[in-house]
Amino acid sequence: MRLVIQRVTDARVTVGGDNVGEIGKGLMVLAGFGREDGEELPGSPVWKKIIDKLVNLRIFTDDAGKFNLSLTDVGGDLLLVSQFTLYADCRKGRRPSFTGACPPELADRLFERFVDDVRPVAPGRVETGVFGEEMFLDFTNWGPVTITLDSDEL
């Protein structure tokens, strides 16, 4: 599982011209699942750790301008968007290969479970995109701050 976390002042996702998710101050998170991720991932120690890191990562600044506050501390929102392209392999040729990405049916289930498990621990609103749809993201990256988390590295 890979997450690309961006600290934002605002973010929205549209599908077919319709706004399907919108947040204020918080984190926009692109979430991808790899071929090695399976049905056993939800509820596992690494699953719990990545969710804990997401909501408690200290990437918001305190009054002194230091990264001392987490999403939980600032009561921020989350926009979660599934993105299989996080598993692109660009080593050969010019067209990325996505064979390292989780099959769509399983990825959809894993993403839905991820959203379900994040909601109870998120301090603010939790919004999502629409799995498998072409989505347009509009956001203001604050900082800019962009952090990646990979379950293989936790």
Image (spheres, grey):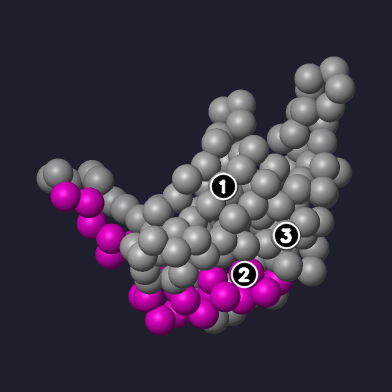
Q: Estimate the x, y position of residue 95 in percent, counting from the top left.
A: 16, 50
Q: Which secondary structure lies at badge 2?
A: helix
The residue that disc 3 covers is 125
The residue that disc 1 covers is 11
Q: Residue at image x 56%, y 61%?
A: 21
Q: Which secondary structure lies at badge 3?
A: loop
Direction from residue 49 to residue 15 in the image, left or right: left
Question: Is residue 144 depicted above or below 16 in this figure?
Answer: above
Query: Which of pointers 3 and 1 lies earlier in the amino acid sequence?
Result: 1
User: Mark 1: few, some, or many residues within 10 Å (few <14, many ≥20)?
Assistant: many
Is residue 92 highlighted in magenta? no
Circle count: 3
Q: Nearer the viewer, residue 67 or 128?
A: 128
Q: Estimate the x, y position of residue 74 in percent, counting from the top left.
A: 82, 42
For the residues carrying marks 3 and 2, which lies nearer the camera in this image? Answer: 3
The answer to whether any part of residue 154 appears in the image is no
| Main secondary structure type of the part rendered in magenta | helix
The CA distance from mark 3 to mark 2 is 15 Å
Residue type, numbered disc 2: Phe
Q: Estimate the x, y position of residue 85 in percent, counting from the top left.
A: 35, 56
Question: Is residue 128 depicted above or below 108 in this figure?
Answer: above
Q: Which residues are magenta?
A: 95-117
The CA distance from mark 1 to mark 2 is 19 Å
Residue extending furthest toward the front:
17
Residue type, numbered disc 1: Ala
The residue that disc 2 covers is 114
Q: Is the residue under label 2 in contact with that under label 3 (CB below 8 Å)?
A: no
